[in-house]
Amino acid sequence: MKVLPDDFNEVFESILDGLPPDCAVGHTIPVEPGKLPPFRPLYRLSPAEFEEAKQQIKEYLRKGWIEPSASPYGAPILFVNKKGGGLRMCVDYCALNKITEHTQHIKWVLRKLRKHKFYARLWKCHFYKRELEYLGHLIRNNGLKVDPKKVVAVQNWPVPQDVGQARSFLGLANYFRRFLENYSTVVAPLTALTRKGSAWEWTRQCQEALDEVKTKLTNAPVLVLPDPSKPYCMRWSQTPQ
């Protein structure tokens, strides 16, 4: 077994006084917009725990680990027994964790994976992203939109020369139909062109349908979840058939 050189003894200090030097990057805890800072009352402590709290706080102040403050945030303390004896003081940040952005969702997913014995490759995972590309879409915190690369692909789609090419275009357009109002009506000339037994003829109506799909997808809206606190407007239509 190799013995570490004495030059590194300070790395293994058991008694630490003071804090490390200031880092170039300050630590922040982003919380959900509009949430009030949690300020929870102290838990009830036993006389022994109360005395231990006073001693540890006094020691932490002396070492510079903590300092007095007038923060709108407040978290209670509690004690757990150390394995070797004595009490370890802990701070209960559960209330703060509940309003911390995004973390609760990540934990929910990871718990599900752990429960059902599914595994993920860490290098393939991306955490704390505000925007995510997924299956031709951009998923954001404010809604769902079409991936701009897919929009460019539709814009550059050439005029179909046969039924197969027309079906390929309709397959791509149909994938994003949720973003295109009156989709079935708009693409009706193209759909008719691909029906079995139909003669191939690229008409003015077909060109207009192609152009309208491109225009609508270029200006596609951002889809958001419905807000149950607001009124709904329902629209429907019917056909003579």
Image (cartoon, rainbow, N blue to C red):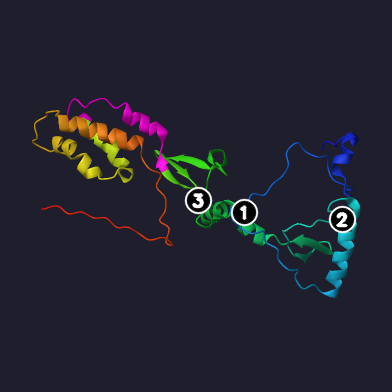
Task: Tell me residue 223's x, y (percent).
Answer: 39, 47
**Sequence-wise first label, 3 or 2:** 2
Report the span colored magenta.
Answer: 145-165
Q: Secondary structure at mark 3?
A: loop
Task: Tell me residue 214's x, y (percent).
Answer: 30, 33
Which residue was labeled with disc 2? 60
Label 3 and label 2: CA atoms lie apart by 42 Å
Q: Amino acid at mark 3?
A: Phe
Is residue 134 part of the magenta span, yes or no? no
Residue at image coords 53%, 58%: 115
**Sequence-wise first label, 3 or 1:** 1
- In the rendered structure, the answer to whether residue 153 lies left or right of residue 17 reads left
Most foreground residue, 104 or 96: 96
- In the rendered structure, the answer to whether residue 134 lies left or right of residue 114 reads left
Task: Tell me residue 54's x, y (percent).
Answer: 88, 65
For the N terminus, the image quarter is top right
Q: Amino acid at mark 2?
A: Tyr
Most foreground residue, 238 or 15: 238
Which residue was labeled with disc 1? 100
For disc 3, the neighbor class at 10 Å (few under 14, some 14 to 19, many from 20) is few
For disc 2, the neighbor class at 10 Å (few under 14, some 14 to 19, many from 20) is some
Label 1 and label 2: CA atoms lie apart by 26 Å
Tell me where residue 191 sits by quadrant: top left
Which residue was labeled with disc 3? 118
- In the rendered structure, the answer to whether residue 51 lies left or right of residue 210 reads right
Is residue 160 part of the magenta span, yes or no? yes
Task: Tell me residue 59's x, y (percent).
Answer: 90, 57
Residue at image coords 87%, 61%: 56
Tell me where residue 39 sits by quadrant: bottom right
Residue at image coords 50%, 51%: 118
For disc 1, the neighbor class at 10 Å (few under 14, some 14 to 19, many from 20) is some
